[in-house]
Amino acid sequence: MGVVTLGFVLLLVGVIFVVTPNLVDKISDFFLDFKLQEVASHWQLPAPKTAHPVLYTAILQFCLVFAIFQIAVLGARFILRDPIDRTAGTISSIVFWFGASLILNSLILETVEWFLFLGLLIMLIGISIVVKNSIVLIAKIFRQT
């Protein structure tokens, strides 16, 4: 599945660049727009000065389409009877990419600010890891009974 996934990612990135006008400029604007923002006493971290909804929307589109692709991969894994750890990894990926879509949507709507967005993304990574390992553990328990 690795080569197929790589091919799909390249295809998807290409399509997003085609359908999003001036995406290269939007990416450049995003990276040139950072400032240091105080997050705690004597702690400053970089954050964008302004919102970048066009860029965030392009990333959201990538996340949604890639999540749907992962559902197709999951179906293939069941058909091919792949090992449970690979199947669990795909389920974890589905959770991550749909979750990232939700968080990005909140960033686009400006219902979360930059550092909350980053915190939620870190939490989502943890949730994805827990999901994968829980599925593997449950499968091992059921195999022993």
Image (cartoon, rainbow, N blue to C red):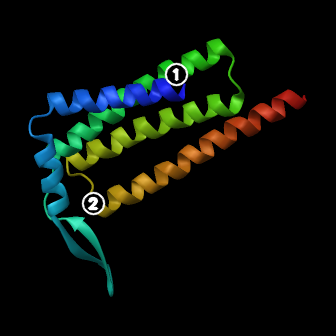
Instruction: Identify the residue position indicated by label 1 in the image.
Output: 73
Q: Which residue lies most toward the right here?
A: 145
Q: Quadrant of the C terminus?
A: top right
Residue indicated by mark 2: 114
* Label 1: element kind: helix
Tag 2 secondary structure: helix
Q: Is 6 left or right of 47, judged from the image as shown?
A: right
Say left or right for 23 vs 92.
left
- Asked if residue 117 lies left or right of residue 30, the reply is right
Residue in view at x 19 percent, y 44 percent: 55
Q: Residue furthest bottom?
A: 42
> Where does the image place residue 22, in percent across and percent down from the top left?
9, 40
Using the rendered image of the protein, determine whether residue 51 is visible from the camera's viewpoint: no
Residue 104's label in the rendered image is none
Circles 2 and 1 in contact, beta carbons < 8 Å:
no
Residue at the location (55% across, 16% down)?
75
Q: Residue at x 39, y 25 (%)?
A: 8
Q: Left or right? Give the position of 90 relative to 27.
A: right
Q: Position of residue 59 (x, y in %)?
A: 27, 40
Q: Nearer the viewer, residue 6 or 101?
A: 6
Q: Label 1 crowding class (10 Å Cα cut-off): few <14, some 14-19, many 20+? A: some
| Three-letter code, disc 2 | Trp
Marks 2/1: CA–CA distance = 32 Å
Picture quadrant where residue 136 is located: top right
Residue 40 drawn above or below residue 7: below
Mark 2 and mark 1 lie on one chain; the one further toward the N terminus is 1
Residue shown at the point (81%, 34%) measured from the top left: 140
